[in-house]
Amino acid sequence: EAQVTQNPRYLITVTGKKLTVTCSQNMNHEYMSWYRQDPGLGLRQIYYSMNVEVTDKGDVPEGYKVSRKEKRNFPLILESPSPNQTSLYFCASTSLSGNQETQYFGPGTRLLVL
Amino acid sequence: QKEVEQNSGPLSVPEGAIASLNCTYSDRGSQSFFWYRQYSGKSPELIMSIYSNGDKEDGRFTAQLNKASQYVSLLIRDSQPSDSATYLCAANPGGFKTIFGAGTRLFVKA
């Protein structure tokens, strides 16, 4: 079954305590992305990766880091979380074949930074 | 700032009617456009992508793109209560960046 998994699903943490949200896909997709979703603002892209070791900034990269050492994994790192990073985070995995795009989102990670 | 604008709604239509969802984008260089459906508490799911001017049909869904007017729409024919969700419009302004609108809430009344 094609899927994107994220862990943890829920996390409460305190300001400044480093955390990592993992994302893994089993479809051998080249392209992966992280988004945050906030009420009234929709989804905003944080970082994306076109393939192993190739990443680039999205619209709101400040305060986040990513890495893509393996094709299947794309972790999101918050080195020093702040309350304004409280949000719902989604990882997505995409393949492009001709003009046909196939995309799967993970189940989401709800983060609260106190 | 590249933007994608949607009416937040809610848009309410009776069962069996056509629901029309609209979206405008600011970056004329955008080449790819997408519609997602998101049920409450769930992840977004890609339902349509469109790259060329005109219409693209997939089952009950039709996406329409007018690059001259920087306008994208999604029509849902024979709307069902199960279509009640938030619909997100997105544009690709270049590379692999994706800009989303804030979404339109659709209610289909039985």
Image (cartoon, helix red, strand yellow):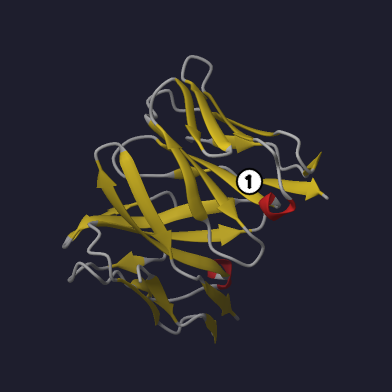
Residue B26 higher or lower than B98, as above or below = above
Residue under pointer 1: B103
Answer with the quarter of the image where residue B49 lies: top left
Residue drawn at point x = 43 percent, y = 49 percent: A59
Q: Which is more toward the observer, A25 or B63? A: B63
Q: Residues within 10 Å of mark 1 (few under 14, many from 20)?
A: many
Question: Residue placed at 69% from the left, 38% from the top?
Answer: B78
Where does residue B6 sit, x and y in percent of width and height? Answer: 64, 37
Residue at the (67%, 63%) spot, across then down:
B40
Could one spot residue A61 in this view of the protein? no
Mark 1: amino acid: Gly
User: Which is nearer the eye, B82 or A101?
Assistant: B82
Picture coordinates of residue B45, whole percent (x, y) = 50, 55
Name the subunit of mark 1: B
Considering only vertical position in the picture, is A114 above or below B4? below
User: At x 32% / y 35%, what residue is drawn?
Assistant: B94
For the residue pair A3 and A64, the one nearer the viewer reads as: A3
Q: Which residue is more in the foreground, A105 or A44?
A: A105
Where is residue B104 drawn, in percent x and y?
A: 67, 44
Q: How many marks?
A: 1
Q: Is residue B56 above or below residue A28?
A: above
User: Can the viewer see residue A79 in this picture?
Assistant: yes
Name the element at disc 1: loop
Residue B91, horizontal then vertical, whole percent? 45, 37
